Amino acid sequence: MSKLIFEKNIPGSNAFSLPVFDGGHPAVETSIPAQFLRQAQPQLPEVSEVEAVRHFTELSTRAYGVDSGLYPLGSCTMKYNPKINEWGARLPGMACLHPYQPQDTMQGALQLYYEMQAMLAEITGMDSFSLQPAAGAHGEMTGVLIMKAYHQHRQDHKRTRMMVPDSAHGTNPATANVVGFDVIEIKSGARGLVDLEDLRAKMSDEVAGLMLTNPNTLGLFEEDIEEIAAIVHEGGGLLYYDGANLNGIMGVARPGDMGFDVVHVNLHKTFSTPHGGGGPGSGPVGVKSPLADFLPVPVAAKQGDTYRFDYDRPLSIGKVKNFYGNFGVIVKAYAYIKALGGAGLKEACQHAVLNANYLRHRLRGAYHIPQDRLCKHEFVATSRNQTPQGVTTLDIAKRLIDYGYHPPTVYFPLIVHEAIMIEPTETEARQRLDDFAAAMEAIAREAQENPEVVIQAPHNADIKRVDEVTAARKPVLKWEGS
Amino acid sequence: MLQTLGLSSLDQLFSDIQADLQLGRELNIPAGCGEMDLRSHLKELAARNRSTEDFPCFLGAGAYDHYIPAALEQLLLRSEFYTAYTPYQPEISQGILQSIFEYQTMMCNLTGLDVSNASLYDGGSALAEACSLACVNSKGRRKVVVPDTVHPEYLEILKTYSLAGHMEIVLVPSRKGAVDIEAVESAIDDQTAAAVIQQPSFYGVIEDAGPIEKAIHAHKGLFILAAEPISLAILKSPGQWGADIAVGEGQPLGMSLSMGGPYLGFMTVRKSLMRKIPGRIVGQTTDGNGKIAYVLTLQAREQHIRREQATSNICSNQALCALAASMYLTLVGPQGLTDIARRCHQLALYARQALEQAGLRLKYDRPFFNEFAVSITDPAAANRRLQENGIIGGYEMKDALLLAFTEKRTTAEIDRLVAILGGV
Amino acid sequence: MNIPADLLYTKDHEWIRVEGDQCHIGISDFAQSHLGDIVFVELPELDIEVGAGQAIGVIESVKAVATLFCPVGGTIVEINEELESSPELLNEDCYANWIAVVELNDKSELETLMEASAYSEFCRQAETGV
């Protein structure tokens, strides 16, 4: 374990300096009342530039990104992040724009923003888009607020409940709760799809809508989507599309054509912007025309050859974020869509689905796959075959680290016991999928022949498994000094 | 590969999607292009924007044109950092986890509070999350008292978040550019979950937060202070003001302006709120060999465990922006940050003197840090003149321009600014 | 599964020990073993009046969270502050480490609670799904 930056302190070694100042040196104490001033400098690291650079470089060597290797993290779409996109977002003409500078001094940025709204609308089959939300969960909140505003505008105040399938990502019920809805859970049937009977029974005039991920979290396309949409719409509800898995249908089918009224997409998943170790992402929200008036302000508009931000939207829910969203992320996603074009986006999806099905096929002997049929961009396996030897999903995940891989998503979705959720994405070659499958098969063999080696994994990682219980019982959340 | 699957075409991979639901045509998006074409296109778009690299910028209003050290820009390109996901697997994510732990420590030290999360989306949504936290944990209180000296966009975001129904924003008009302390005091009652102050205010004024802290604590509500991070090198910290929660926009700490994002929402709280704070948190623990290790912790607060009982749906952080902030604070150090803060203030003082000599006056005669409003009859016309002269002007108020000064500005640039404004 | 015979139980896996007008309440062995390593207990507020079935606290483990419901109506007259710093006591001995003491409003409410034998059957069903 390397030292914390604070433990590398060498007082006086920081040589950061400002240009010479020629405007006089009045002391701050003479212009700001003493009662407003801080007495002592904040405790921050004191190191030289080279020490700082070495510190952060060393930290980077103890991280694993898409650039390090295959990253089959289900539901997260860890595809390659093309470098030209990073380059574009860092151009001074993109990165050094003040959000409030006059709109005629950023027409290029506004054009990009406007075109991005239109391209996302085309990809999802929606009518209008807002690029403001900063992440998927933020987009969900925005979308569900729009649903709420829509019902309230129609004086339909009875709709206080939101339906969410039991296979849903935790953010769906959390979002519904945060926006003030009571959550009704919809069961999944034996085939891993929404149970239509349960849906029908729970739909009522108190339900605002249904939040659905399609393909769902098992990687399965909700084949009854038209009937689901009919049930919800006939009951006066709206259909919300969680775009986490859009990569599984992009260019082939569109949520808008399936009857969805509101969608959010994750630019950091489907459109290849890097995840940044947890963010920043971007979660644009699209709606059908009856909901367009409720989108956050501003929305980019075009008049003649001029682009501008339109704030004049009286029914808008307002703002969910400062300024216009994560523009720097939007630039990268824009570049990605431009590079692939319409045909390329579909091809990306086809290969993502091909890769997932290929891996599912390769692994079906070694691992139990509860829904072993055609999947979309991801599939869910389990460790059931390894249970008799006392090997769990967590053990398999940790053992994969020894083989040089980032583990898949584990223990999700909750409806599958000991789930291992695998999403290879389209950016992996067949040879790399074979390598990964070989590692998974080797682990399955180890689980039979020498389970301890799996149970005790990882063996050659940076650290062994950590004590999460003490971390939560006696939290140490900052460096307190030596 | 298709053969392995017993398929003959890629289309068969989608046989589970009814034919009438399939698009059946190509997306109406222009054909793709190679890297060289893409590069030209992006360059062409960028060329139609005026960048603060080429034009001196006096705009602030929540986003500031500070200098970003070259070392930071290069370190941030380490792709093990930026192509990683959330550090769910501590065994191969110690670098990212440690960097967040260091970030949390720095934010606690800067704000004078006990616990920091791993960051939120931006300043405005961080404030909304703080107000939400106060209401949800107040046993039935739902009022949040907010002076209108808070950033107008933050107020918009607060209003939007309050559509959820759990909080009611009580907006208190200001007096002469500062918080109307008496009005705030009388707005606070036993139904008030929290009182908010922004420091310095949106109008650049350093506020006297003391009376508000006393009033809200007398009614057992929480005191939320939205702070500007660079000013904290010289101004009293939220902790010293008695705040229970500090939030703010972290963009000044090494993030480019990027037309408004991605930025960094920071949030720190008193220890008593440790298990209520939204967002990711990293804690220190040990591994199976007793070695120090870092891990995402206190996860029982979060949506993937609480689901429909969660009080925030946040499941990410702005990790790369938080990393930029800790690199920034490391590269400038405590003395550097103090020098930067002082320089910003000194440039603002220089500008005030020059503007007054040119016959202009400040809209509010109150202490400021690096931003103030100068009275101008037609701010839009003034901004146009500045633009024609290659200067990105200020934020347009009704009868004033709000001007901000960072360490990147020079006295020569300020002289040009004043010469143009003085001539309007 | 340890289910002491002298206690009453709820479907939310809380136990109740009645002593005159006062009830000690805690969580059962079933609850603590399903939660796993308990890392935090948010204790009820002292001296407040609560109704039967009202949420009065939260128990957190690393991977789960459970709401503590008050099994009977009354006033919270005592809380076990030791759990604040040592939540693991609930894992070590969930019956010796009570969470709160409630002064009963209405003794007849106790009739709605399960005896050990009924609770044992309830747990068996919860475990096997039959």
Image (cartoon, rainbow, N blue to C red):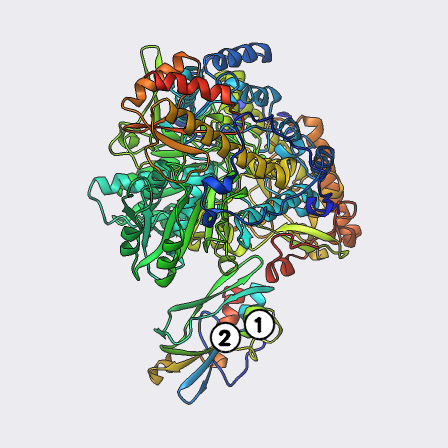
Q: Which mark is residue C90?
A: 1
Q: Is residue A299 visible?
A: yes
Q: Position of residue A79 (x, y in %)?
A: 59, 29
Residue C99, numbered circle: 2
Q: Earlier in the sequence, mark 1 or mark 2?
A: 1
The residue at 36%/58% (across/down) is B216
Q: Residue B252: image x %, image y %?
A: 52, 34
Three-letter amino acid code at the position of disc 2: Ile
Find residue B211 and report its horizontal and vertical position in percent: 37, 55
**Chain where mark 2 sits:** C
Disc 1 is placed on an element classified as helix
Q: Looking at the picture, does residue B231 appear above or below residue B358?
A: below
> Considering the numbered disc 2 on the image, is that residue within a helix, a strand or a loop?
loop
C22 left or right, relative to A294: right
Image coordinates of residue B228 in percent, x first then y, are 47, 40
Q: Please tell me in which quadrant of the rendered image residue A428 appears.
A: top right
Which residue in the rendered view is the most extreme toward the left? Answer: A155
Q: Is residue C127 left or right of residue A195?
A: right
- Extreme-bottom residue of the structure: C20
